[in-house]
Image (tube, rainbow, N blue to C red):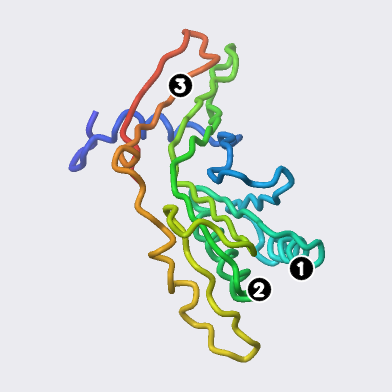
C-alpha cells in the first residue's frame, strides 16, 4: 500500500528491510588462463583486504621465491582494489606481461529474519547475485600478445620518479568490455525454512 504523498516500495525491497545479512560466499570458478603452472599463486582480493598485507605476500612470492607468474582476482567492490595491487606490483618490478579477463561471478548471500515467528523456526533468505569479476595474470615470461586483454610490459619506475597517473595509463586497454549477453542479470531470492513452505521472488539487479 502506498504511503500518503509517496510511492509504494517494491515488494522485494520492503521484504528485505526485515532481514539482516549473516553470511556471504562466492562461486568457485577456474582461472581463465590456459597453461598455468599447477602451483601458481592466486591472490584473492576481498573488499576488506589490506593492500599492504596483500603486497607483502605477493612481492615475497615474486622476489624471494622466484615465481614467474602470479594471479590477482576480485569481484564486486574488490575489483578496484585488485587493479590497485596489480599496478603497484607492475611499478615495483617492471617488465611484467599482463592479461586481464573480465566476467561475472555468482555471490550467495544468506539473510536472516530479524523478527521471526515466536513458535516457528528462523526464516532465511538465500540471495544469488551476479557481480562483475576480474582476473589479472602477471608474468615475467612473454605471453601471447594476440589474446584478448593482453598488455605489454611497462618500464620500471625508479625511486623518486613521478608515478602519478600510472594506474590509469593502460587501464582502458586492460579492461575489455564484458560480452553483451553478460550485462543484464537477474537477482533471485529463495525463501527457505519457512513454516508455510518456500517460495521464490525474482527482481532485476542493477549493476
Q: CA distance from mark 3 to mark 1?
A: 47 Å
Q: Residue at x 58, y 16 (%)?
A: 118
Q: Residues within 10 Å of mark 1 (few under 14, many from 20)?
A: few
Residue nearest the viewer, comparing 158 with 22? 158
Position of residue 160 measured from the top left corner of the image (x, y, whole percent)? 62, 91
In this image, 86 relative to 67: left or right?
Answer: left
| Residue picked out by circle 1 | 63
The percent coordinates of residue 163 (x first, y second) are 53, 83
Frontmost of labels 3 and 2 is 2
Quick one: which residue is furthest to the right in this view?
Answer: 64
State which tag comes first along the sequence, 3 or 1.
Answer: 1
Mark 1 near mark 2, Cβ–Cβ under 8 Å?
A: yes
Nearest the camera: 132 or 21? 132
Q: Which residue corresponds to mark 2?
A: 93
**Picture quadrant where residue 103 is located:** top left
User: Which structural element holds mark 1?
Assistant: helix
Amino acid at each position: 500500500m502506498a504511503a500518503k504523498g509517496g510511492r509504494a516500495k517494491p515488494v522485494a525491497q520492503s521484504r528485505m528491510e526485515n532481514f539482516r545479512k549473516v553470511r556471504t560466499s562466492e562461486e568457485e570458478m577456474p582461472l581463465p588462463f590456459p597453461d598455468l603452472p599447477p602451483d601458481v599463486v592466486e591472490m584473492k582480493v576481498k573488499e576488506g583486504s589490506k593492500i599492504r598485507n596483500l603486497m607483502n605476500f605477493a612481492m615475497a612470492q615474486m622476489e624471494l621465491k622466484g615465481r614467474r607468474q602470479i594471479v590477482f582476482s576480485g569481484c564486486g567492490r574488490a575489483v578496484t582494489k585488485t587493479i590497485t595491487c596489480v599496478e603497484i606490483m607492475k611499478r615495483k618490478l617492471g617488465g611484467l606481461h599482463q592479461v586481464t579477463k573480465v566476467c561475472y561471478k555468482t555471490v550467495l548471500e544468506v539473510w536472516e529474519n530479524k523478527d521471526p515467528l515466536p513458535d516457528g523456526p528462523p526464516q532465511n533468505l538465500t540471495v544469488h547475485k551476479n557481480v562483475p569479476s576480474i582476473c589479472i595474470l602477471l608474468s615475467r615470461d612473454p605471453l601471447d600478445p594476440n589474446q584478448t586483454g593482453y598488455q605489454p610490459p611497462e618500464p620500471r619506475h625508479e625511486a623518486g620518479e613521478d608515478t602519478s597517473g600510472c594506474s590509469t595509463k593502460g587501464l582502458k586497454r586492460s579492461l575489455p568490455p564484458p560480452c553483451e549477453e553478460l550485462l543484464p542479470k537477474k537477482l533471485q531470492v529463495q525463501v527457505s525454512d519457512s513454516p508455510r513452505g518456500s517460495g521464490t521472488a525474482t527482481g532485476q539487479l542493477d549493476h
